[in-house]
Image (spheres, helix red, strand yellow):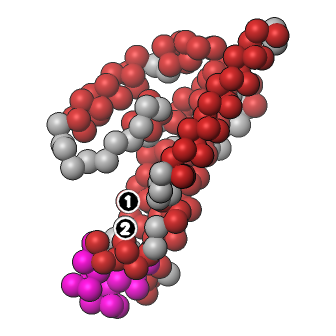
Amino acid sequence: MSSDASEQVYDFVYRAMLAEEALDVAGRIRRNELDSTEVADALSFELFDEDLLEQARLMSAVYTAIAAFEMSVRRFVKKVLMDTHGEDWWDKGVSEKIRKFVDSRRTDEEKVKWHGVRGDDLLTYTEQNWAICRRSCSRTGSTSMPTFHELTGRRRCSRHWSARAM
């Protein structure tokens, strides 16, 4: 890396650290600092039966594990695609069919105002990450990967399972 590029990186990181500190001084509340009691109060948990809340809490651990795994796979897929195709990874490494699906899903979700934002990473809009990964990682020869569609189905089910089924 050239000296000028290194200096730009250090300047960027230093400004980011200063911004983080300024936000903290201004009283920023980080998500991991939210008190679960505050969240429960804001969402009116007291209106629900305690046994139903307990079942939901148990299943949230399953949902969290699956969602974290999905995000890890997306991060891996993006890294492989960027290493293989560079900055044009989306256009060169992802099929037109998947890109059109993502555009359609993004457009549909923008219409629903209460829907949370997925972020800027286009891979969060697709369930075909295993297929993309399989194509990009074909040099490993592994074909035993499940599909993201199957995993997403398990995540959806985790929101509806009874704690007694565990």
Q: Amino acid at mark 2?
A: Arg
Question: Which residues, given as a range, are shown in magenta?
Answer: 43-57
Q: Nearer the viewer, residue 76 or 96?
A: 76
Residue that numbered label 2 is attached to: 159
Q: Residues within 10 Å of mark 1 (few under 14, many from 20)?
A: few
The reply, left or right, for residue 9 in relation to residue 26 is right
Please tell me whether residue 49 belongs to the stretch shown in magenta: yes
Q: Is residue 38 above or below residue 108?
A: below
Please, is residue 82 above or below residue 123 in the view? above
Q: From the top left corner, tell me how far across and down residue 122 is, in percent.
A: 44, 30
Q: Which residue is mark 1?
A: 156
Are circles 1 and 2 on residues that touch, CB within 8 Å? yes
Q: Nearer the viewer, residue 147 or 28?
A: 28
Residue 117 belongs to the span the image colors magenta: no
Q: Secondary structure at mark 2?
A: loop
User: Can the viewer see residue 29?
Assistant: yes
Percent position of residue 41, x then y: 30, 78
Q: Residues within 10 Å of mark 2 (few under 14, many from 20)?
A: some
Kindly state the secondary structure of the residue where label 1 is placed: helix
Residue found at x 52% / y 65%:
33
Question: In the figure, is residue 79 to the left or right of 42?
Answer: right
Quarter containing the N terminus: top right
- Give the percent coordinates (x, y) of residue 116: 31, 47
Nearest the viewer among 138 and 10 is 10
Residue under the image location 54 percent in, 52 percent down: 24
- The answer to whether 124 appears left or right of 82 in the picture is left
At which x and y percent is residue 93? Answer: 55, 18
Please report the residue visible at 63 percent of the width from the left and 21 percent of the height from the top: 82
Tell me the amino acid under the disc marked 1.
Arg
